[in-house]
Image (spheres, grey):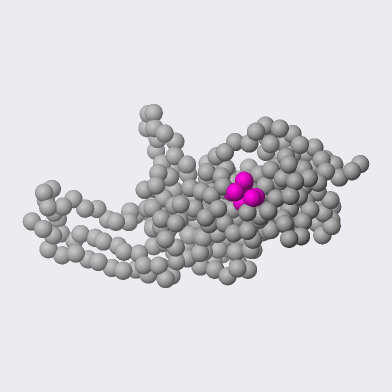
Amino acid sequence: MYPTLWDIAAVFAGNFPLLLVRVSSSCNKDACNLTNVIPTQDNSAPTLGYNTAVKQTIFAVEDDADISRLVRHHLEAAGYAVRTFPATAGVILEAEKQAPSLFLLDIMLPGSDGLELCRRIRQTSSLAMTPLIFLTAKTSESDRVIGLELGADDYIAKPFSPRELVARVRAVLRRFERPLQPSIVKAGDIEIDSGGMTLTVRGQLTQTTATEFRLLEYLARHPGRVFTRDQLLDAVWRDTHYVTPRSVDVYVRRIREKIEENPDEPRYLKTVRGAGYRFEIPKS
């Protein structure tokens, strides 16, 4: 027997249509064998069996239940483990218990917003280098710049394509899977240890995001050489389809705030007008 009734509801999350399909009468095994298109939400960590490959875990913080299910469904289909949170409460505590491979944050959340959560993540030493992507309806250029300045590694605007979401998550994770060649670069009063991914400025250990560190490390390994923004995107970001040259400017500004005594008059990270950026070793 074919099903006698289908319940189809189009639920609009923001401007993005999410199709939920439910079979309200049974099917025999020859006619159909269907389950819900979008699985129910489950915040429990995945159970690993013997000889099971450990999946990369993504923490998704999204208050809209339909978008949360959509994100979880497509990321799990792509091979990731996903833990979802409807608000910022408890996210850092759970992340310190089980460090995620990536944070995916909405900005407009009940209580503390995603921007504040991003700040707290970047201030937590055990999580500071964890990749982070904003997934939000705030789509202006200024919103994007604010997100990047707070330490986000990417910024996805709603409504979004699930295929694009998965592609950008993969691109960000691939960026950090490439190991850096162990070396120590000393320049003036800063020391860059690529093996330990640590930055010491004037004798003090200084926290950076993984993207900030990789950009600084790349420039410092080529002192005196001028790089265009596109060259830096190719070298550090690799997958540049979703990244703009403006992102480089944001990260350079963040790095200067951490390594320069006066970011407005940099000694190390110089702007070459009309060309790009150059790392210089100050003369003693």
- Residue that protrudes farthest toward the front in the picture: 274
Residue 33 x %, y %:
18, 50
For the image, the number of numbered tags is 0
Q: Which residue corresponds to the image point at 46% horizontal and 52% vertical from the top-left?
A: 167
> Residue 222 falls in which quadrant of the image?
top right
Quarter of the picture holding the C terminus: top right
Taking the magenta stretch, the answer to whether it contains residue 176 is no
Magenta stretch: helix, strand or loop mostly: helix
Residue 241 x %, y %:
52, 55
- Residue that protrudes farthest toward the left in the picture: 1
> Residue 150 falls in which quadrant of the image?
bottom right
Quick one: 125 or 223, which is closer to the camera? 223
Q: Which residue corresponds to the image point at 31% horizontal and 69% vertical from the top-left?
A: 10
Q: Is residue 157 above or below residue 204?
A: below
Q: Is residue 34 above or below residue 97?
A: below
Residue 131 x %, y %:
57, 48
Q: Which residue corresponds to the image point at 60% horizontal and 49% vertical from the top-left?
A: 234
**Horizontally, is 107 left or right of 273 in the view?**
left
Using the rendered image of the protein, determine whether residue 174 is visible from the camera's viewpoint.
yes
Which region of the structure is painted magenta? Answer: 231-237
Taking the magenta stretch, the answer to whether it contains residue 235 is yes
Residue 275 x %, y %:
72, 57
